Image: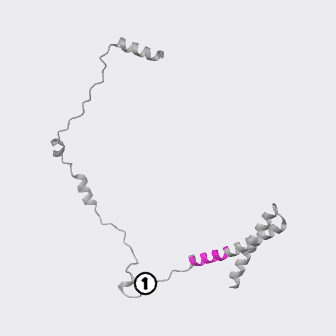
Amino acid sequence: MKGNLLFNLVFGVIGFILTLLFSLTNNLFMTSVIRGAVSFVVWFLLAFLLRWTWTVISAPQEDTAPKGGEDELTGNRFDLTTPDESDELNELLKQKPDLSNERGNDFTPLNPPKLVSTKDPEELAKAVRHLTEK
């Protein structure tokens, strides 16, 4: 326990000194000391949080599985293997598509009307000249 408290105190003193040094450049001495004291408390508590997190992470996991015959392995492993279906896939790929449905459709391609002008080219030229003048 003494080592834990010492760790927190060292952490708090480091925070106090850093805050005091950086605060002295822009503030009065008493303002810097007050901010340093607040920083000491915050860093001290942050050390507690850091130690608690480290303890939780590094603690060994307890074995909750019951001791006994087959039940010991039940639920401890998860089999991710899939059955071999390569033969079925190869058969599906080898099959040829049924063409009887495609021939039975009365498909006719679209025949759009041709966009050809039947006007005299001279009239069209006059219309273009008239539009470009404006």
In the image, farthest residue toward the right: 29
Instruction: State which region is magenta.
Output: 46-56
According to the image, label 1 marks what residue? 65
Q: How many marks?
A: 1
Is 50 magenta? The answer is yes
Q: Which part of the image, by quadrant, shows the N terminus? A: bottom right
- Estimate the x, y position of residue 71 in percent, counting from the top left: 37, 84
Which quadrant of the structure image shows residue 6? Answer: bottom right
In the image, farthest residue toward the bottom: 68
Q: Looking at the image, which is closer to me, 76 or 13?
A: 13
Q: How is the image coloured?
A: one colour
Q: Looking at the image, which is closer to me, 118 or 25?
A: 118
Q: Looking at the image, which is closer to me, 99 or 47?
A: 47
Residue at image point 36% right, 72% down? 79
Residue at image point 68% right, 75% down? 45
Location of residue 82 with respect to 127 vertically, above or below: below
Q: Is the magenta region chiefly helix, strand or loop?
A: helix
Which quadrant of the structure image shows residue 66? Answer: bottom left
Q: Is residue 95 left or right of residue 65?
A: left
The answer to whether residue 113 of the structure is visible from this angle is yes
Amino acid on which the number 1 mark rests in the picture? Ala
Q: Kindly state the secondary structure of the residue where label 1 is placed.
A: loop
The answer to whether residue 14 of the structure is visible from this angle is no
Location of residue 121 with respect to 90 vertically, above or below: above
